[in-house]
Amino acid sequence: MLRGAHAIALDTKGRLAVPTRYRDWLREECEGQLVCTIDIANPCLLLYPLCEWEEIEKKLKSLSGMNPVERRLQRLLLGYASECELDGNGRLLLSAPLRQHAGLDKQVMLVGQLNKFEIWSETRWLQQVDEDIQALPEMDWTISDKLRDFSL
């Protein structure tokens, strides 16, 4: 179970040190293999253990390439998907295009979301938390039928 928000410094090569409490679990669950892609709704990255990502791929494969919204979702999530492996020191290398998309520089937040992590720039994370708290009472929860059961 991935949860909690962790402030982490990226090194000069763009590597993120996964908190120690998750390293053994990730090595056991997915042999340290993860997949990182963009979040289509927020300026952050999504980091999945490989076994979780494979479930997402099945869902993406089931979407229609003829529906422009569904095709766009496939294009973005799969197009940015990058395999990452925990190194011997528990670090992951985030590719330059992924870091650029999320506006990551030195200080990032690794945020557990049960089956995945979100990776945010620390500044954007703090802004997003404030916005989320303020927006909750006014949100429109309507979504398309096709995407209702689609979870990332």
Image (cartoon, helix red, strand yellow):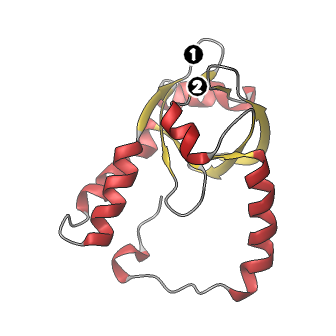
The answer to whether 150 is drawn above or below residue 101 in the figure is below
Q: Where is residue 80 in the image (x, y as percent from the top left)?
A: 41, 43
For image coordinates 61% across by 30% down, the residue present is 25
For image coordinates 54% across by 26% down, the residue present is 28
Q: Residues within 10 Å of mark 2 (few under 14, many from 20)?
A: many
Q: Is mark 2 on a helix, strand or loop?
A: strand
- N-terminal of the pair, mark 2 or mark 1, is 1
Task: From the viewer's side, name the closer residue of 116 and 1.
Answer: 116
Amino acid at the residue labelled 1: Asp
Amino acid at the residue labelled 2: Leu
Horizontally, residue 47 falls left or right of residue 91, namely: left
Disc 2: which residue: 92
Disc 1: which residue: 87
The answer to whether 38 is drawn above or below residue 14 in the figure is below
For image coordinates 82% across by 67% down, the residue present is 130
Q: For residue 52, what is the image quadrant?
A: top left
Horizontally, residue 39 falls left or right of residue 67, namely: right
